[in-house]
């Protein structure tokens, strides 16, 4: 009884077979079919390799939301060299809340030589080249995000030669913590002193002839310091054409959460607009000589996430490639054989057309003449 049930089940499964097998004696192979099969297998292998490379690659997904964090502090990372002696310049931050952050809270004044060494010039040239490429091809920023923490450091390399030249510039580097409101970080003549209505700088004792706000920004970033990330002002160098000259940078800071397979950090991106002018009160160009970086915090936060193609999607795409190529090559091969058969059939019919044979009574015969043999007697 069980054998009968099993046999009925097998017969039922055979009737439901959607892929009937054709006996090998009914299968006919051809050179054209083999050629098409070879092309199909080669194409499948090539596209499979390409699809696997796409599967291994990752991309960055950008999401936007409102930044609800207004209580935390914003870190400013600074490394700027000014072509003046350290005792002549002062740096500090003043925000919209009239809160002053003095440079003594986290900045270091280091006497240095303004002119770079050959190795440092090469570093600056490469950094400026990367900056120009980033402005032309924005997709390179994704590569920088994915290579964070594992790429080479973007900091200025130390001076390799022991220059005997006396220091003629001041390197101001370190970090400051400020409120998450718009503010103004500036470097100008004289040290900053607190004032009931803001702040002031002791610039009366410094001669105007010693003013020189030529500067080089080796690094400027906001938020957590992430090695390998290149910021818009890194490598910038400005040479003053006059003693009384103002350099202004208008910065918009965007809070950013970065999540990759290597790191997870909270940092800040920013865009900048540059402006410079000579202070000439007689010509109506008023202001104070110095370097001013006015920053504003965006209300939007960007979340950058590195994503990867799921394995099931890779399998679906792979099956689509294999099935599509087999179907397409089968259709093209069948169509090609049909066209070839039509052309060859007409050619054969044309070669076997009947010839006209004249008869003695003046009629013609369309029948093919019988073959004759000259050796017949």
Image: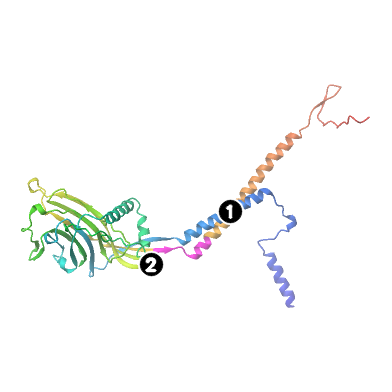
Q: Residue at x 23, y 60 (%)?
A: 162
Q: Is residue 244 left or right of residue 318?
A: left
Q: Is residue 221 visible?
A: yes
Q: Is residue 152 left or right of residue 69?
A: right
Q: Quadrant of the C terminus?
A: top right
Q: Which mark is residue 54?
A: none
**Residue 123 in the image: x percent, y percent?**
30, 56
Residue located beneath label 2 in the image: 262
Viewer-side residue, 312 vs 122: 122
Task: Report if residue 159 lies within the magenta region.
Answer: no
Q: Quadrant of the N terminus?
A: bottom right
**Residue 345 in the image: x percent, y percent?**
71, 40
Of the image marks 1 and 2, the number of the one nearer the N terminus: 1
Viewer-side residue, 59 vs 162: 162
Q: How many marks?
A: 2
Residue 32 lies, with reference to residue 233, above or below; the image says above
Distance between mark 1 and mark 2 Cα atoms: 37 Å
Q: Residue at x 7, y 46 (%)?
A: 282
Element class at badge 1: helix
Task: Report if residue 307 lies within the magenta region.
Answer: yes
Q: Is residue 372 left or right of residue 142?
A: right
Farthest residue to the bottom: give it.
1
Residue located beneath label 1 in the image: 42
Q: Is residue 357 left or right of residue 249?
A: right
Q: Which residues are magenta?
A: 306-316
Please identify the quarter of the rendering in which residue 161 is found: bottom left
Please identify the quarter of the rendering in which residue 85 is found: bottom left
Please identify the quarter of the rendering in which residue 127 is found: bottom left
Q: Residue at x 50, y 60 (%)?
A: 52
Q: How dense is the environment of label 1, judged by Cα within 10 Å: few (below 14), some, or many (20 and up)? A: few
Q: Is residue 182 visible?
A: no
């Amino acid at each position: 009884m069980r054998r009968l049930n099993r046999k009925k089940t097998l017969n039922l499964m055979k009737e439901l077979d959607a892929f009937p097998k054709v006996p090998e004696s009914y299968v006919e192979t051809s050179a054209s079919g083999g050629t098409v099969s070879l092309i199909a297998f080669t194409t499948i292998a090539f596209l499979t390799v390409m699809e696997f490379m796409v599967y291994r690659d990752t991309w960055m997904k950008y999401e936007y939301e409102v930044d609800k964090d207004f209580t935390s502090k914003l870190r400013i990372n600074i490394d700027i060299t000014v072509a003046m002696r350290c005792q002549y310049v002062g740096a500090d931050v003043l925000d919209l809340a009239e809160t002053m952050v003095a440079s003594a809270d986290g900045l270091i004044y280091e006497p240095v030589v303004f002119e770079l060494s050959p190795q440092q010039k090469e570093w600056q040239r490469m950094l400026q080249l990367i900056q120009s490429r980033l402005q032309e091809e924005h997709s390179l920023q994704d590569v920088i995000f994915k290579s964070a923490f594992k790429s080479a450091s973007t900091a200025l390399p130390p001076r390799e030669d022991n220059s005997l030249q006396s220091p003629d510039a001041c390197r101001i580097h370190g970090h400051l913590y400020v409120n998450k409101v718009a503010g103004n970080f500036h470097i100008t003549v004289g040290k900053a002193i607190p004032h009931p209505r803001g702040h002031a700088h002791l610039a009366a004792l410094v001669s105007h002839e010693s003013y020189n706000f030529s500067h080089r920004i080796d690094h400027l970033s906001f938020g957590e310091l992430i090695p390998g990330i290149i910021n818009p002002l890194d490598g910038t160098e400005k040479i003053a054409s006059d003693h009384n000259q103002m350099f202004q940078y208008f910065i918009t800071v965007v809070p950013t959460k970065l999540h990759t397979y290597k790191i997870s950090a909270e940092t800040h991106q920013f865009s900048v607009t540059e402006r410079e002018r000579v202070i000439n009160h007689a010509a109506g160009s008023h202001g104070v000589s110095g370097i001013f970086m006015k920053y504003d915090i965006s209300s939007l936060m960007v979340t950058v996430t590195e994503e990867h193609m799921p394995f099931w999607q890779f399998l679906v795409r792979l099956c689509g490639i294999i099935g599509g190529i087999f179907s397409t090559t089968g259709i093209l091969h069948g169509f090609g054989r049909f066209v070839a058969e039509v052309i060859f059939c007409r050619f054969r019919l044309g070669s076997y057309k009947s010839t006209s044979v004249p008869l003695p009574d003046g009629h013609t015969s369309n029948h093919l003449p019988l073959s004759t043999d000259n050796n017949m007697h």
